[in-house]
Image (cartoon, rainbow, N blue to C red):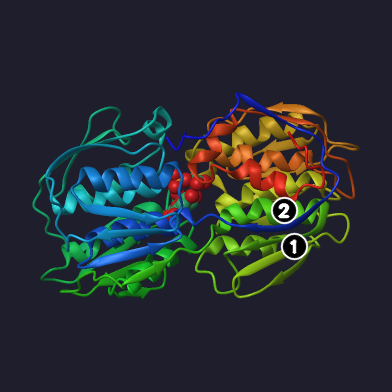
Amino acid sequence: MTQQKYYPQHLDLHPVTQVEGTVRLPGSKSISNRTLLLAALAGGSTTIVDLLASDDTMVMLGALHSLGIKWEQIDDNTHIVHGADGVLPVHEADLFMGNAGTAIRPLTAALAVIGGDYTLHGVSRMHERPIGDLVDALNAVGAQIEYTGEVGFPPLRIRRGHIHAQRMSVRGNVSSQFLTALLMAAPLMAREHPVSIDVEGELISKPYIEITLNLMRRFGVTVEQDGWSSFTVAAGQRYTSPGTIHVEGDASTASYFLAAGAIAGGSVRVLGVGRNSIQGDVRFADALEQMGVTITRGDNWIEATSNGVLKAIDADFNHIPDAAMTIAVAALYADGTSTLRNIASWRVKETDRLAAMAIELRKLGATVEEGADYIAITPPAEEIHAATIDTYDDHRMAMCFSLASLDGKARRGNAMRINDPKCVAKTFPDYFEAFASIAREKELF
Ligand SMILES: O=C(O)C1=C[C@@H](OP(=O)(O)O)[C@@H](O)[C@H](O)C1
Ligand SMILES: C=C(OP(=O)(O)O)C(=O)O
């Protein structure tokens, strides 16, 4: 999608002996797509500064355009969205959602509640990513959503229903985005009565719900929370533009650069997220600290400095499923077996990430145990093997495996061929340029 850029079929990364420098992060995907939708649903115009420019945000911007929401880009860093105050000017549309979970899930809920005749579809992997829990929750209160392919998965056809929501419930153990979607649509259902959403069973990826609640608050809607099991939106609240919203840097993207500093620093500093971040993925830096890395934090930056061999880690990563992939590759440089637990959601993301991670780490000489919801990684005895890495159309596979070209203290990295590097465009089209900018070897590829 964001392909004004040229990408080769594969990229050969030479081994890198040291990294050092500062990287300005692109905007957070999670904040960008939530802000775009909330701005569209709000009364008034919202100026969005530092919106992420990537495939996932193009998908949301494209959908809003098709729905008749007016927006414009003022300059490289500034967009203005003219909110339609809870209505959508276009009542019939066919919407391409790419592989953006942060677009299809919240839009499904908003469109089902507002009503119209809409189809939502995406790339083939999107049609394998579950959405049944969200559809069930909405149809149970009068929405009219049908599957046009396999039951439980996109594509979807949405028609005008008769929503009578006062109490809804949704399962939380497959994706937190279903609850996010219902929360964002809840004020549209709570015109006359309060709406409560109960979470059935376990809720995964909880910090993403905090991002949702934080941004809803900035658009004037407060949610009463009873732990993680029930959320209530009082009647009569409307989204109103906060004027200007600044999008923080992406904390998941920060993980690649912080890990590079941890493995082969020098110091690497990321600008755009820091101790004031609303993104759970800043806690990736805590995991690096547990591995023995020195982390320094400012209000809007984080820095990682290598202080020796990384310590192996055994921890629960349910709260940071995306950044946890970076730990799996950093584990190649650790002093023993690292175990990443409670990450079953990896199986339903851009690819089956547990399977893909195991296959590719083994190519590098690691011994890998792949469980239903965990992965245990024992690094190769000496250097990391040179390999051709398949990326499974998964931006995070491409970004985290670039780290295996780094020389660590415990073992050397090696030349890596990254197949299909263009997949990074989902969240960071310029990733490899940013990675090269911190490498001591300026001729990285
Ligand atoms: O709400 C969000 O912005 C996201 C939630 C997480 O998904 P799950 O809740 O499916 O784990 C995360 O993996 C995804 O990249 C972004
Ligand atoms: C899981 C991810 O994306 P999505 O928002 O499509 O779920 C991700 O970016 O790692």
Q: In whole angstroms, how far apart are the C-alphas of marks 2 and 1?
A: 8 Å
Residue 111 in the image: state x and y as whole percent: 20, 49
Say whether residue 277 is visible. yes
Judge from the rendering whether residue 139 lies leftward or rightward of residue 200; answer left or right.
Answer: left
The amino acid pointed to by label 2 is Ala
Quarter of the image containing the N terminus?
Answer: top left
Does residue 28 appear left or right of residue 270 in this picture? left
Label whose residue precedes the other's in the sequence (2 or 1): 2
Name the outermost residue toward the top: 9
Residue topped by disc 2: 259
Which residue carries the number 1 mark? 304
- Residue 359 or 221: which is nearer the viewer? 221
The secondary element bearing badge 1 is classed as strand
Q: Residues within 10 Å of mark 1 (few under 14, many from 20)?
A: many
Nearer to the camera, 440 or 378? 440
Give how far across and how far down residue 353 sits, in percent.
57, 38
Marks 1 and 2: in contact by CB < 8 Å? yes
Image location of residue 140, percent across then percent down? 19, 50
